Amino acid sequence: MRSIMLANRLHLLLPFALPAAADASTALHDIQSPALDRLIARATLVERVIGEDFQRTLPHERWVARQFGALPSGAAAADEAPLAPYMLRADGGEPGDATWACVQPVHVRIAHDHLVLIDPASLELSDDEAHALLAVARPLIEELGVRIEAPQPARWYLSGDGFGTLAGASPLRASGRNIEIWLPHEAHSGERSRAWMKLQNEVQMAWFEHPVNEAREARGLPAVNSIWFHAQGAAQPVHSPFARVLSDAAATRGLAITAGVETGAPPASFAALSALADGANTGAKAGAKADPTSGPANSAGSANSAAGATLVELDPFSAPYIEQDWARWNDAFAAVQADWFEPALAALQSGQLSELGLTLCGDTGSVTLTVTRGDLRKFWRRRVLASLFIE
C-alpha cells in the first residue's frame, strides 16, 4: 500500500485526553482500548511534562508554543504561552509588533462564598448577542486608551500600555474554580492591575441589565456578566516542525500561518485524512502533467512537504473534562479509538504510515510518544496507559 502524502508521518495532539490519576478509575471505567494500548505499549517516550496545580496556562498551549518556538528567550520551562497575537492572526487580524491579549465575554457565577468562572463555550453566545455587547463595550475600552480588534464576535484582542506584563489564566484552566487566584496579575510582582480592573468594572456595569442579558435569562441561559483576559504577548518569528497543521484552535492555526505552513480543519477521522491525501495526490499529479514549466524547485517543494509530519489537533475531550462529565468523556474516547487509533495502528502495521506521534494532555501535564512500524515488533516493551497518568 502506498504512502499517504498528508499523513506519512502523523502527530495527534489531544487536549484533555489524559485524566489525572485521581480521576482515572472513573474516566476510564469499562473502556476497551486495544489499539491505544498496543500503541502505548510499544511507543518510545519522547517527553513527560509534570505541571503544577496553579499554572495559569494549559499543557497543550505550552506544547504548541514550544514546538513553534513562540516562547520568549529563557522561558521554555516557564508558565508561559503568549498566544494571543497568533490567535488574532488566525481570526483574520494582523498583530504587527504590538503586544496583544485575548479577551472573551464570560459568565461568572456566584457560589456560596466565592465566584466561579464557567466554560465560555457553554454560554452558547450568538454572533448577534456578541456584536450587541461589543457595541456597548468598545467605546468604554477605547476611552481608556486601549486598542481593540474583534475579527471574531466572541473573541476580542486588546492592546494597551497599561497592561504591562499582565498574566492571565486560560479560561479552561480557571473554569469551574474559584476565580480569586486566577485573576490577572503582574507577572513580575504578583500585583493586580488597576488598568485591567477599571476596564473590567466599566464593562461589567455597562452589561448589567443589558437587553441581551435580560433576553438570555428569560430563556434560561446565563448572563454575560464579565470579561476574561489571557494569553498576552507579542508576535515573533516562529518555525514549524510540521509540514501542515489541521486544527480548529485559533492559537495552533495562527502559529502555523505565521510559520508559513499549510493549515486546515481537522478531518473527522483517519479515513477522511486518507481521502484528503488521495485528493491532494491526484491534484498534484494532474498539476504536474498540466504545467510543463514545473521544474526541480517545485518537485523539491513537494518532496519536502510530503516528508514533513502532519499535526492534527483533536478536541472532543475539553468540555466533558472541565464539566467532569465522564460518561460523555468516555463516549469521546471510544469515538477517537474507532476513528483514529485503530486505523492509525493498522496503517503502521501495513506501512501506509511510517510514524505516529501522540501528545496526550491533561489539565496540568502532558506526555508525548512516538511509534513506528518497527516499534510494533518490540514485544518486550510493556508500558501501560495507567503509567502515563499525571498525579
Image: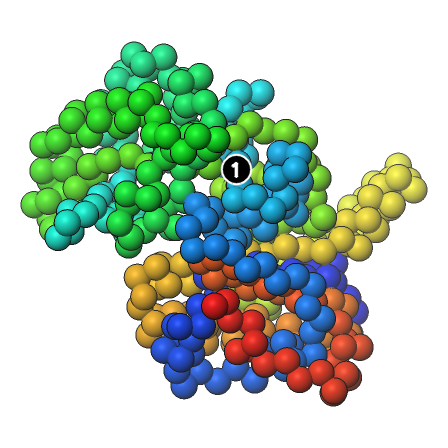
The picture places residue 87, in percent across and down from the top left corner, at 50, 36
Seen in the image, is 320 located left or right of residue 165? left
Q: Of all residues shown, which one is farthest toward the right?
A: 296
The residue that disc 1 covers is 83
Reply above or below: 368 against 376: above
Q: What residue type is labelled 1?
A: Leu
Please identify the residue farthest to the front as the structure is shown. 189
For numbered disc 1, what is the local secondary structure? loop
From the top left corner, tell me how far across and down residue 189 is, in percent: 44, 30
Q: Where is residue 158 in the image (x, y as percent from the top left)?
A: 41, 25
Give the image quarter of residue 353.
Answer: bottom right
Please report the residue visible at 72 percent of the width from the left and 56 percent of the height from the top: 309
Q: Where residue 58 sits in the image (x, y, percent)? A: 47, 51
Query: Does 308 appear above or below 181?
Result: below
Q: Can residue 272 be seen in this view?
A: no
- The answer to whether one can see residue 207 in this image is yes
Residue at 26% over, 49% down: 178
What sort of colour scheme is used for the picture?
Answer: rainbow
Residue shown at 40% from the left, 18% from the top = 162
Near mark 1 (Cα within 10 A), the count class, few <14, some 14-19 or many ≥20, is many
Foreground of the two, 128 or 111: 111
Residue depicted at 15% across the width and 35% down the height? 212
Vertical side of 161 occupied by 157: above or below: below
Between 225 and 278, the residue placed more toward the observer is 225
